[in-house]
Amino acid sequence: MNRAAAVVRLQLVRRTTWFVVPLAIMLVAGVATVIIQLAIQRATGMTPSSPGYADSARNNPALAWSVSGYLVATGVASVSSVFPLASSLGTTRRGFAAGTLLTHALASAYLALVAAVMLGLELLTGHWFVGIYVFDTAVLGAGDVAVLLLVTFLGSLSAFTVGAVFGGVWLRFGPRGPLAVAVVAVLLLAGLLLLLAPSLADIAGAFRAWWLAVAGVALVLVAAGGTTLSLRGASVR
Amino acid sequence: MSTAVEVTGVHRTYGSTTALAGVSTTVREGSICGLLGRNGAGKTTLLSLVAGQERPSSGTVRTLGHDPVESVEVLSRTSFVRDSQRWPDDFRIAHVLSVAPAFHAGWDAGLARDLVADLRVPTRTPIKKMSRGQASSVAIVLGLASRAPLTIFDEPYLGLDATARQIFYDRLLADYAEHPRTVLLSTHLVDESESLLEQVVVLDEGRVVLDADVDTARASAWTAAGAAGAVDRVVGSRRVLARHALGGLASVTVDGAPDEAVRREARAAGVELGSVSLQQLVAALGAGAPTVDAGAPATADEGALS
């Protein structure tokens, strides 16, 4: 079997990690959203047909944020704890990096598909029969399934690959590796913010959603490249 | 017969620590080679170089005819589970049995299942939470069932009970007879594994101090035991590998083979000459300083020497 495909199989053999836990987190976030939105309806007397209700309910990023931390952690573990075994089983470092990236892409596609199906159900049921907005939210495209697929896929893939690069630098440089990457990333972001500060208003005015998609793809490429580079010199121990 | 492993002038350093210093050896294809030596001698480092998991600081390593680092040709035909192997969280033996065939073309699922049963590997316990012996059993399953043309065992007996160790010896020999391959085995249990080995490489402080077939290794030293003064006279200026003294008695392990003059002198002086076991030889080679004086033998083997 191709080494990268073998690594995918090695990664995905723990189905609970990749397929069950993210759904459980989404479910918990969904239940929390239902409770909060019902509470708001009761507290304010608003109904789903009230003016402005839908816009307010759509400003709910809970689903996206709730699962992202887990995806980053899973990305870290997919490199730091699986690489030694993959090496023992006879995979190359390049093969491991490629297989792990492919795993992240497959898991992200799975999450995107699940989110799309759930959005479909949400729309078909008139927002779960009581005007609850879980998947039909602004951050996920406000009911546009194509945007939801893209945002969920790229968002998940970004989280996995960022986690993976932290796992890679930890294997390569020990505890100082992730610390250094975090410090450099914060400094770069801070520098970028200071550099663009005078033009932020213009940038905000010209902002297009596809910029985020490009940024997501760039982040994935940089993170995957960083993971591959760090694994080249990583210790198997 | 061709060469499976060829190591030439290999140095490996980690910062200021030298793990290997000019190691050269070859392992014949289809043989079982024991890599012996004390803790920290460099055994695992050498094995990881052979398995392509590390690069030498200098020197060359050829495994199955190739530079093993990032070589699909080599890595797909090699199994190497470290003594301190790290496992993914929640990884169980079922996961191992499920994924291993994707990596090893010769994987024998039936053998793997039999080994899991015979070695009583827990099926529900995550490998990370297994006892030392249970984790060693998992490594043995992975190595033996892989049927990898180069199968490397790094201290496979750690924590194993006597029954499990015997199962390992029996299964290794039986499988090796049916499916010959090159086996590299690092171990401290020299006596137990001696009958498995065709070649031994002994490392000490990162250097090869013995590289020979087992019979030649056993014949490469001898022992003399008796009154300390008489022993010293018999040994004369010959190279003493290890010396143990208890009161007025002494036992020495001497490099080379005893000639007729030594035998005559020993008989006259009441000094008993003997052959060395591989265990005694490895212990002597790893002793460093040639003289060990103790109030009592530190180990059973040293007791036997005394």
Image: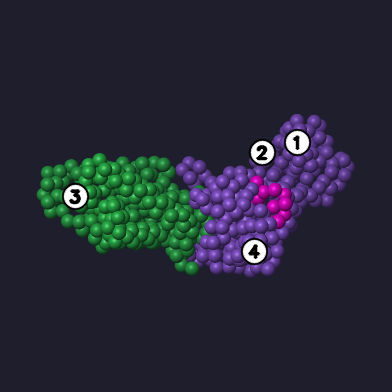
Q: Chain coloured green: which letter? A: A
Closer to the eye: label 3 or 4: 3
User: Residue A175 appears at what percent x and percent y?
Assistant: 41, 42
Left or right position of A189 against B234:
left
What kind of element bears circle 4? helix
> In percent of the image, x 38 and y 48: which residue is there?
A28
Closer to the eye: label 2 or 3: 3
**What amino acid type should be assigned to the residue bearing mark 1?**
Pro
What kind of element bears circle 3? loop
> In percent of the image, x 61 and y 46: which residue is there?
B132
Crowding near the residue tagged with mark 4, few <14, some 14–19, many ≥20 C-alpha atoms within 10 Å? some
Q: Nearer the viewer, residue B27 or B114?
A: B114
On the image, numbered disc 1 is attached to which residue? B297
Give me the C-alpha separation between circle 1 and circle 3. Answer: 91 Å
Please tell me the colour of chain B.
Answer: purple
**What amino acid type should be assigned to the residue bearing mark 4?**
Leu
User: Residue A50 appears at what percent x and percent y?
Assistant: 19, 50
Residue A62 visible to the viewer: yes
User: Residue A234 appears at what percent x and percent y?
Assistant: 44, 51
What label sits on residue A50 in the rendered view?
3
On the image, numbered disc 2 is attached to which residue? B289
On the image, numbered disc 4 is attached to which residue? B111
Magenta-drawn segment: B156-168
Give me the C-alpha separation between circle 4 and circle 1. Answer: 43 Å
Residue A79 visible to the viewer: no
Q: Decide which of tag 2 and tag 1 comes sooner along the chain.
A: 2
